[in-house]
Image (tube, rainbow, N blue to C red):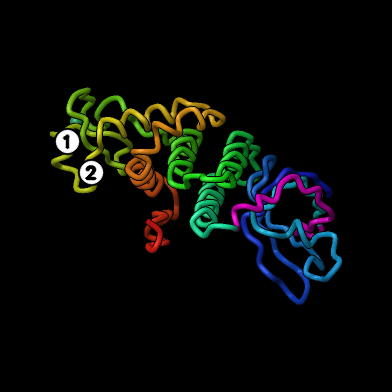
Amino acid sequence: MQQTVFAVVARAVNYRDHDRILTLITRERGTITATARGCRKPQSKLMSCAQPFVYGEYELAEVKGRWYVRSCQIREIFYNLRLDPMVLTAAGHATQAVREFANPEEENAKLFTLLLRTLARLCEEKADPISILAFFLAKLLDFAGFCPEMQACVCCGAEENLGWFDGESGGVVCRDCARHLPTAKPISPTCRQLIGRMVQTPTAGYEALAAQLSPVAGEAYAHLLSSYAATAAKPLPHLHSVLPQVT
Ligand SMILES: [Zn+2]
């Protein structure tokens, strides 16, 4: 069987002398593992498409239940991701998170577009990885059906004193309920409002929100990470804890 898919390389692991096993996040059918045979030989046509974060149109062939890359038309290599360790780590987190939520064999254009936009934003000069990841997580949770509740207390429905956020419970909580939730963390009114706005904003609308988001990005990102950890199989580490030397 042959199939052409639009895909981003999430992982590339060397195999045997000249091959690489690629984990591809595809738009058409979730995550696929495919071998790029001979891609590490000099002059191989597959050399440049068998690198992490490359986006392209991959032509795959299935042989005895395994997928092989036949050819690829590269669309974008997102070169700038590799110039800054913080940006590279952020790109790795976004890719890993999409892998967790991409259902096998399922078409998911929304999630795929979100990943492509996020990688492109991270490549921009003066990109703020924390703001970009905060927006990415808000949209990811929304698309996956885990949109955090920001308008009323998730425990009792109260609409006042919403000064806490609890990722485990799925959104903001009021003062009374927060007393009984050991994992609830304080949230500022600006941050609460902005998480609500990020969820409402389409994937393409980040740029219009970026300036307002920037002052509370770290706070929003930490709250959204706790929501993500409560819903995904594997939690993502906070960017700052991965790179403590970067402040
Ligand atoms: Zn409450």
As drawn, is 47 to the left or to the right of 99?
right
Q: Label 2 near label 1: C-beta < 8 Å?
A: yes
Q: Quadrant of residue 6?
A: top right
- Mark sitting on residue 76: none
Outermost residue, bottom side? 17
| Mark 1 within 8 Å of ligand 1, using the beta carbon | yes
Range of the magenta residues? 63-82
Q: Residue at x 72, y 66 (%)?
A: 20
Q: Residue at x 80, y 46 (%)?
A: 3
- Measured as percent of width and height from the top left, residue 138 is found at 44, 37
Q: Residues within 10 Å of mark 1 (few under 14, many from 20)?
A: some
Determine the secondary structure under disc 1. Answer: helix
Q: Give above or below for 45 relative to 15.
A: above
Q: Quadrant of residue 195?
A: top left
Q: Which residue is mark 1?
A: 177
Determine the secondary structure under disc 2. Answer: loop
- Foreground residue among 60 and 75: 75
Q: Main secondary structure of the magenta part?
A: strand
Q: Between marks 1 and 2, how big is the CA–CA gap?
A: 9 Å
- Measured as percent of width and height from the top left, residue 116 is found at 62, 41
Q: Which residue is mark 2?
A: 184
